[in-house]
Amino acid sequence: MLKLAWRNIWRNKGRSIITMAAVMFCVIFAVVLRSFQVGVWEHMVGDIVANNFGYLQIHQKGFWGDQNLERSMDESAVDWSTLQEVPGVRSLIPRLESFSLVSTGDNNRGSLVLGIRPEDELAGLRLTDQLVDGRVFSSASDEVVVSEGLADYLSVEVGDSLLFLGQGYRGASAYGQFMVSGIAKISNPELNKQLVVLPLETAQWMYNATDLLTTVVVDLESDADYAAVKLELAPLLGEELELLDWEQLFPELVQTIEADMAGGQIFVTILYFIISFVLLGTVIMMVSEREREFGILVSIGMRKTRLAAVTVLENLMLLMSGAVLGMAVVKPVQFYFKYNPIDLSGQMKEAIEQFDFEPKLYTTTSFLINLNHGAIVFCIGVLVSSYAVWKIMNLNPVKSMRS
Amino acid sequence: MSKPVIEVKNLEKVYEGVVPVHAVNGISLTITQGEFTALKGPSGCGKTTLLNMLGGLDQPTKGSIAIGGVDITTLSENELIDFRLRNIGFVFQAYNLIPVLSAQENVSFIMLLQNRPKEEREQRARQLLEAVGLGDKEDKRPGQLSGGQQQRVAVARALASKPQFVLADEPTANLDSQSTANLLDIMERLNKEEGMTFVFATHDDRVIKKARRIISIEDGKVLSDN
């Protein structure tokens, strides 16, 4: 039966090749489109979440909704040693973050002030790789690293002083004057415009928040599943603390991703809708051409169900050949653009940057996308084959042989 | 006396329409094993309709058809298909071979449907192709064979399932004289040597001359039976 189905595919070579090519290009187009879409978000999430904010964060309950130093937690409230032993946890990273007015000369800007220990930090905040000028501050010093965008805005250079003015813990005034030890390019455009980083202990001192933290970032092993680690960690926290994953930390980002994905889905759905009709046309033509032959096969003793199965097999083999070819051909393209993203330029670049997104188009190499589209083609194959099945099941051998 | 293979009683086939057409009108007949019978008559007399009903391809409006004692008018669609597969061989006017299969595969195909083992299929297909004089053409596809050769493959295919009888609808209509003579010789030999029952629907005199029983049909009725 397999042999018969295979040979039937090649009885009209031209049509089969055109059908296969149509499916192949459809899969290539759909996979490339989705790979860029998923890749861009994957990169963005990787950049924002994995490199800067972490997949999991521990806070005093309510801090994330109302980011106020009054909702900071005491370092001793966290059972550091127990939490670090949870499988999948690489380290726990303490931070103190708040907002201050940062000024120099006539320029000032409300800025995100982040107290960290760079040597313990996530890749995006280790600073050494991000520095475009100067050096990283030394521990507990009166030095800061300023993000490149903010430095441009304030027109500061390494060695200049910055004045900080804000509100500290329990209503105390928070002010200080610190020297710029370095300027860093932060990959996230939003952070790059407003971030000032200083030693954790210095930040605690300025905000009158000795031994207090606003955030403990849970740094995960590269192969760890954050949802599984979250389940392990949550019961180990005290009642006053909360553990949020990145989807809870950035619901707007999740919504934006979902909205963008839905837009892409609509586009791909339209594409598949069109290709479905092309394939249905092929199946209608095939059934019409072979109606007489179907009649003969049923006459000589082939059950209609068996004949229908051969026809479905034939269609699926034809469509899946195209789909598999498409899935294979597109793979190198996915790999190429993952490591060589398309740099956007001109108005497109400006438009993207307005939304604080990096103006580069990456692809994902996830084979799941290819498999998904292979599965979609399989379903379309089953669907369009149902026409042939319907025709065969309602076939009258005598009438068919006269056709 | 030979046992009856086909027993038809009061068979009627009416095609409904503005004016109902009685394609077969009260035919009764019996065909016994080993017969070489021709149903003759002008176009539209009802011989093909009768043949289709004998082969279980068409349902009668009235009457019964018993094949080997089984009333095929009472069988379900699938039972009828299986019955045809095991009991009836068909030879059609337009050869009707599967174009993507070789001669040997066309003959084997029916045995494949019967779930016979591969070795048996191949051996019998080869024997049958030898019997119809196409032993050297077993790898050829229908498109590579002449009309006469294709019809001989169709005869081999009809015999492959070891049927009780073979129904042949105008088997020589598309053949030249030489091919017709060859085909008839082969079928006559199979009839005489193996006792295979053949029923033809034809208006070809060359076939009628070879037949040992001739049933003349006109307006859906048996006019004569000699």
Image (tube, coloured by chain):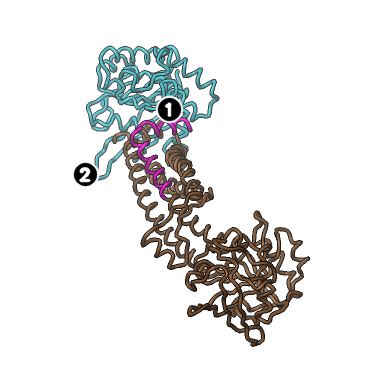
Chain colours: A brown, B cyan
Q: Is residue A332 above or below residue A292?
A: below
Residue in the foreground of this view, choosing between B112 and A206: A206
The residue located at (58%, 63%) in the rendering is A134
The disc label shown at residue B19, or none = 2
Percent coordinates x, y for residue B200 in the rendering: 33, 23
The secondary structure that most of the magenta stretch takes on is helix
Amino acid under disc 2: Val
Relative to A236, is B26 on the left or the right?
left
For mark 2, does the 10 Å Cα neighbourhood hold few (<14), some (14 to 19), or many (20 or more) residues?
A: few
Q: Is residue B74 above or below residue B170?
A: below
**Which residue is tagged 1?**
B88
Residue in the foreground of this view, choosing between A236 and B179: A236
Percent coordinates x, y for residue A281 in the rendering: 33, 45
Outermost residue on the right side: it is: A81
Amino acid under disc 1: Ile
Label 2 resides on the chain identified as B
For label 2, the SS is loop
